[in-house]
Amino acid sequence: MRIIVGVNDSVIITDENVYDAHTKKFRNRNVIVLKPGEEYKVQETVDSIIEQLIAFKADRKTILIGAGGGTITDITGYVASVYMRGIQFGFVPTTLLAMADASIGGKNGVNVGVFKNMIGTVRQPQFILHDMAFLNTLPQNEWENGFAEIIKHACIKDAVMFKELEENSIKKYQKSKKGICDLVQRNVILKTKVVQRDEFEKGERRLLNFGHTLGHALENQYELSHGQAISIGMTYAALISEKLVGFKEANRVTDLLLQFDLPTFAEFHRKKVFDVLAMDKKKEKQNINYVLLEKVGKGIIKSVPLKQVENLISEI
Ligand SMILES: NC(=O)c1ccc[n+]([C@@H]2O[C@H](COP(=O)([O-])OP(=O)(O)OC[C@H]3O[C@@H](n4cnc5c(N)ncnc54)[C@H](O)[C@@H]3O)[C@@H](O)[C@H]2O)c1
């Protein structure tokens, strides 16, 4: 962890890649610079940030700002929710994934071993500032990851966006400032509306977990990026949808994922993955609330016995 001491009261949390690529933007600020990567999204990092906040003499008036990808915004929101029983916070998302998805909705937290987001809270940021200039330094594989969540939104809620994506490519969006701004805005509005209607995930918000049940079970066991993991998760969920609810467009979903350089099918150790799946937060007794597709643009939630999910995945 690197510490930079500034002149005002807010404290920015970021990671080394973002800080090194955009050092000027952090001038005169208090900054806590974390090591990059999902492996640091753990309680130990939270504890070290809290120790540093105490060293900064941060109090209840301090505003915490998470400037980074989803790893940073998830950690920042969590630290701000528990430090002194809760201080204000805001986000400056710097990856496509965080701009279009992770910074929105107030879910925060950290992983415990292979279990994703096992601890955390739901608490909304005071602001989210989109500075699209951050995308100028985003590595190609992080563009791909961002499109995984964008394709997820299209699958569950927006057939028109799905079609637009089919007619485009990462290259085209990278070349068109307006194209990428409009796309991010469309995703922000889509997710915000869902969260406003169902902040605490009693119903509709569950749709946003499309691809995440299997995806989360794979992500930390196989060191996949979040985008890659949910891309595989969406592929399997689309095929399960064909078997359980008569979905007819699984090929369209996998073709679109491949078009955006995302993985679809994967070899994995069934038992190890099913053991993690059994701890999924969407499980209720022996059933799991699986997000399926009725058609492109229309996600539904179906309670499916865990055993049946395992059998269906094994058959694919
Ligand atoms: N809270 C939510 O609702 C929600 C939703 C989706 C995903 N998530 C979480 O988000 C995380 C994934 O987010 P992510 O893909 O943004 O990961 P990330 O924060 O790990 O960023 C990915 C990589 O990009 C680098 N990076 C970030 N911005 C950059 C920039 N502008 N220029 C150069 N490099 C940059 C980072 O240093 C890192 O190496 C996962 O932990 C996932 O669980 C949370």
Image (spheres, rainbow, N blue to C red):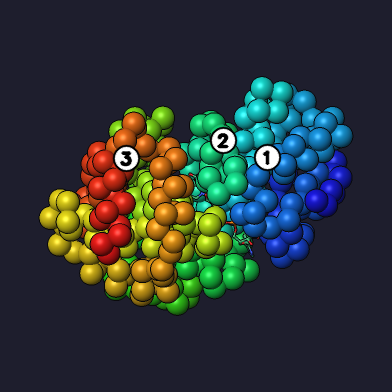
Q: Secondary structure at mark 3?
A: strand
- What residue is pinned by disc 3? 288
- What residue is pinned by disc 1? 43
Q: Position of residue 143 (x, y in %)?
A: 50, 67
Quarter the C terminus occupies: bottom left
Residue 158 located left or right of residue 80: left
Q: Nearer the viewer, residue 96 or 203?
A: 203
**In front: mark 2 or mark 3?**
3
Badge 3 amino acid: Ile
For the residues bearing labels 3 and 1, Cβ distance under 8 angstroms: no
Q: Is residue 73 above or below residue 145?
A: above
Q: Is residue 79 above or below residue 221?
A: above
- What residue is pinned by disc 2? 119
Q: Is residue 173 above or below residue 237?
A: below
Q: Residues within 10 Å of mark 2 (few under 14, many from 20)?
A: some
State how far apart marks 1 and 2 are (Cα).
9 Å
- Please name the residue shown 73% across and 56% down the image: 35
Q: Nearer the viewer, residue 65 or 315?
A: 315
Q: Can residue 269 be seen by looking at this rendering? A: yes
Badge 2 amino acid: Ile
